[in-house]
Amino acid sequence: MYANPQQWLDILDKVEQLDIEIIVPGHGEVCSLNALHQVRAYIMDLLQIVTDAAQRNQGLDEITVPSAYQDWFFTTYFKSNLQSIYEWIEKMGKD
């Protein structure tokens, strides 16, 4: 995740408001709004996981992929997504 997670959530909200039935993403298979909801949940979960870990002084390396996402194709990016979210949260705290 090389973007601002809040912007991702805002964009997903805007797409959902378009009242569409089919989504043709830039990569991956054609999907429905259900996929959009899953991505939104994933981003929100990542934000919560990183926030909780920071509050407990837990290292990101100690965090495992939640069971809800273990069968997702891109779980190989889970750790880098955590790191990106962590860096975004740190940056937001400094601004």
Image (cartoon, rainbow, N blue to C red):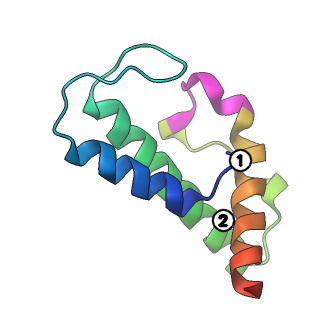
Give 51 or 84, whichever is nearer the viewer.
Answer: 84
Alpha-carbon span between mark 2 and mark 1: 16 Å
**Residue topped by disc 1:** 2
Q: Please give the name of the residue rendered at 38% of the width and 20% of the height, measured from the top-left corner.
A: 24
Q: How crowded is mark 1: few (under 14 residues within 10 Å), some or many (20 or more)?
A: few
Q: Please give the name of the residue rendered at 54% of the width and 66% of the height, measured from the top-left corner.
A: 48
Q: Where is residue 44 in the image (x, y as percent from the top left)?
A: 48, 58
Give 66 or 38, whichever is nearer the viewer.
Answer: 38
Residue 71 highlighted magenta (yes or no): yes
Amino acid type indicated by mark 1: Tyr
Q: In this rendering, which labeled residue sits more in front, label 2 or label 1?
A: 1
Q: Where is residue 31 in the image (x, y as percent from the top left)?
A: 34, 20
Q: Where is residue 50 in the image (x, y as percent from the top left)?
A: 66, 65
- Residue 21 lies left or right of residue 26; in this view the side is left
Amino acid type indicated by mark 2: Val
Secondary structure under tag 1 reads loop
- Residue 5 lies left or right of residue 13; in this view the side is right
Residue 23 highlighted magenta (yes or no): no
- Residue 77 lies left or right of residue 70; in this view the side is right
Residue furthest top as drawn = 29
Vertical position of residue 37 compared to residue 32: above or below: below
Vertical position of residue 61 compared to residue 57: above or below: above
**Stretch in magenta:** 69-76
Magenta stretch: dominant secondary structure? helix
Vertical position of residue 86 compared to residue 28: above or below: below
Q: Residues within 10 Å of mark 2 (few under 14, many from 20)?
A: many
Secondary structure under tag 2 reads helix
**Residue topped by disc 2:** 50
